[in-house]
Image (cartoon, grey):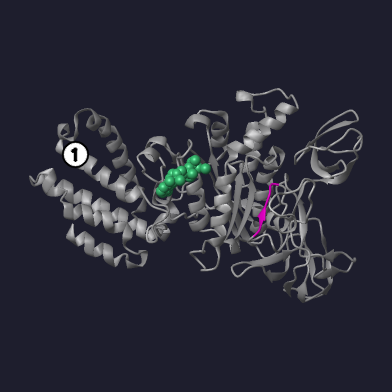
């Protein structure tokens, strides 16, 4: 094995099981096989493919479902029936399918890596830009038009190099870009608590830690459906099979709220359930982000959603344990933190390689499942150090069925996006947000007293805070992904809702000053108005709001 390299892909045994070199000592190599190793025998042949695990990148990625090493699950199911046979190999992308290629450049044109030479309408929602692969440069001798298979050359350079609409990229290596850009625009989710209090930049990263049943999966799916991204890469990583099965059956039926086309038209799903081999699970995160980067390079805004990185870290722990490496905290390998950092580092908004100054972004939102809901464990802590934000899901909120169960006291975002909100939504956005946060904090403090002796023991001003706090928690922070009108709340609507709550608070204080009692101030009528705000369609604002504010 003297010439083998770390991370080279190999085929093992008669069944040609796919594996990876994960350790080399003298002329011995250790191979991690991605599948069940039943049937491997002593003396079995090992074939080194000469390169690392690569993703196939080209049209056909969207609306596909892959496993962690990018085997097309639908294709395999069609060929083999319900269960993936060991040793099955099938190209990730369909070789027979023809795609209509439309050239954008003419012969004689000098081109280099990242340049777009033509387009393919990949799905009804997304135009695939065919790019020159990294390392290729030259002058176009010939460029074709019409229906092409992935292996057909769409262009030939003067030096004879053929350009095909498919390329390969080693998944563990970040794809290149010209430079990173600091993004000032938010990654809009339509979820009030996120967009108002803890927004992240597009090209940012966030962790969503939460104990069992706190709504991580539901939130990831809500993001998949509503977040303002061109492309969605959903990585179901190591969660239970039946949960993933639910995603797989539900997702393809979903309609894209922005285009009306199927949501799958702009999505790729990567699934590795807990009962699938751990090595492929470890690879799935890299496969997913590589596909994300590829669409970023075309100039799209991509969201990579992973559920959950804890299962990924556990896969790393299992592999590391078998190698008898020196364990770090809680048995995780010493390199856990650096692996996590390297992964989140692949998020970002960039100026893409190639001519034309395209910009693209990869936003990364990952669920974390800390055992027992204890956020002090190594995966949450290591991820926290490298992401810019945390949407902390809280067991108590989930138990009270306050959803999304994002805890406003424990969550944070380091992204500074106020300027964007001032410019694009309203100049008083930061003030309103500041008021909301302060009110919620005060409410939280007062809740201790309320629990102990009841609200009547509070001073009247504090009772106003508690009443308002309750109304806001119920009607602003809570939001149902299943309500047609409320599942996505546009930013303008968030602003006007917030403004109405603020006005209601001001009027309450004023009336209190005039000697009214709490019951006279917080009438049922008023409460109903505030509770109904979320059901007013977004386009009715600001007119609806102006009416309501007059009446408060
Ligand atoms: N936003 C939500 N709205 C309503 N119910 C929710 C919401 N999020 C979670 N739930 C409820 O909580 C259950 C568990 O959520 P899930 O996302 O599967 O938790 P986790 O992935 O954290 O274990 C769901 O089946 C659903 O009943
Ligand atoms: Mg889950």
Magenta region: which residues?
64-68
Residue 157 position in % (x across, y down): 85, 68
Depth check, front residue: 12 or 82: 82
Instruction: Tell me if residue 297 can be seen.
Output: yes
* Magenta residues, dominant SS class: loop
Residue at disc 1, secondary structure: helix
Q: Residue furthest front?
A: 81
To which quarter of the image does residue 73 belong? Answer: bottom right
Q: Quadrant of the N terminus?
A: top right
Q: Residue at x 46, y 47 (%)?
A: 416
Q: Residue at x 83, y 68 (%)?
A: 153
Q: Quadrant of the C terminus?
A: bottom left
Quadrant in which ligand 1 is drawn: top left
Q: Which residue is mark 1?
A: 463
Residue 388 appears left or right of 360: left
Relative to 462, is 121 above or below? below
Instruction: Tell me if residue 203 can be seen.
Output: no
Residue 536 appears left or right of 367: left
Relative to 378, is 159 above or below? below
Depth check, front residue: 158 or 172: 172
Depth check, front residue: 299 or 308: 308
Residue 190 position in % (x across, y down): 43, 56
Q: Is residue 263 magenta?
A: no
Q: Residue at x 10, y 44 (%)?
A: 517
Q: Residue at x 64, y 28 (%)?
A: 332
Residue 154 appears left or right of 28: left
Residue 198 position in % (x across, y down): 43, 45
Relative to 525, is 274 above or below? above
Q: Residue furthest left?
A: 515
């Amino acid at each position: 094995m003297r010439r083998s390299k770390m991370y080279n892909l190999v085929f093992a045994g008669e069944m040609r099981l796919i594996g990876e070199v994960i350790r080399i000592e003298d002329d011995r190599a250790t191979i991690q096989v991605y599948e069940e190793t039943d049937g491997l025998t002593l003396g079995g042949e090992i074939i080194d493919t000469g390169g690392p695990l690569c993703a196939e990148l080209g049209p056909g990625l969207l609306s596909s479902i892959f496993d962690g090493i990018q085997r097309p699950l639908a294709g395999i199911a069609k060929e083999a029936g319900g269960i993936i046979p060991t040793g099955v190999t099938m190209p990730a992308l369909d070789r027979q399918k023809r795609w209509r290629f439309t050239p954008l450049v003419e012969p004689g044109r000098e081109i280099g890596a990242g340049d777009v030479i033509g387009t393919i309408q990949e799905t009804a929602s997304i135009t695939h830009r065919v790019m020159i692969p990294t390392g290729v440069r030259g002058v176009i001798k010939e460029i074709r038009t019409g229906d092409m298979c992935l292996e057909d050359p769409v262009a030939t350079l003067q030096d004879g190099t053929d350009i095909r609409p498919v390329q390969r990229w080693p998944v563990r290596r970040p794809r290149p870009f010209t430079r990173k850009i600091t993004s000032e625009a938010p990654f809009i989710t339509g979820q009030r608590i996120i967009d108002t209090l803890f927004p992240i930049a597009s090209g940012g990263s966030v962790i969503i830690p939460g104990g069992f049943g706190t709504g991580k999966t539901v939130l990831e799916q809500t993001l998949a459906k509503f977040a303002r991204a061109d492309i969605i890469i959903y990585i179901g990583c190591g969660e239970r099979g039946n949960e993933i099965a639910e995603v797989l059956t539900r997702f393809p039926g979903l309609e894209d709220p922005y285009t009306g086309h199927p949501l799958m038209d702009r999505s790729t799903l990567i699934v590795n359930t807990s009962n699938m081999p751990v090595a492929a699970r470890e690879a799935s995160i890299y496969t997913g982000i590589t596909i994300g980067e590829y669409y970023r390079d075309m100039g799209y805004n991509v969201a990579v959603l992973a559920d959950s990185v804890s299962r990924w870290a556990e896969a790393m722990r299992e592999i590391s344990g078998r190698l008898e490496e020196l364990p770090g905290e809680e048995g995780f390998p010493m390199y856990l933190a650096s692996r996590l950092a390297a992964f989140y580092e692949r998020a970002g908004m960039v100026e893409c390689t190639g001519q034309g100054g395209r910009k693209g972004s990869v936003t990364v939102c990952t669920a974390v499942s800390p055992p027992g809901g204890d956020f002090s464990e190594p995966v949450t802590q290591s991820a926290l150090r490298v992401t810019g934000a945390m949407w902390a899901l809280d067991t108590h909120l989930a138990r009270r069925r306050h959803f999304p169960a994002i805890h406003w006291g424990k969550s944070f975002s380091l992204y500074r996006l106020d300027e964007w909100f001032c410019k694009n939504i309203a100049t008083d956005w930061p003030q309103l947000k500041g008021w909301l946060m302060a009110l919620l904090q005060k409410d939280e403090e007062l809740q201790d007293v309320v629990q102990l002796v009841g609200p009547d023991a509070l001073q009247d001003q504090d009772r106003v805070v508690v009443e308002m706090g309750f109304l806001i928690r119920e009607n602003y922070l809570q939001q149902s992904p299943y309500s047609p009108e409320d599942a996505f709340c546009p930013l303008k609507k968030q602003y006007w809702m917030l403004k109405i709550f603020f006005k209601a608070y001001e009027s309450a204080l004023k009336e209190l000053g005039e000697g009214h009692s709490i019951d006279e101030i917080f009438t049922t009528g008023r409460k109903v108005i505030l509770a109904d705000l979320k059901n007013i369609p977004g386009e009715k604002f600001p007119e609806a709001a102006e009416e309501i504010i007059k009446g408060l």
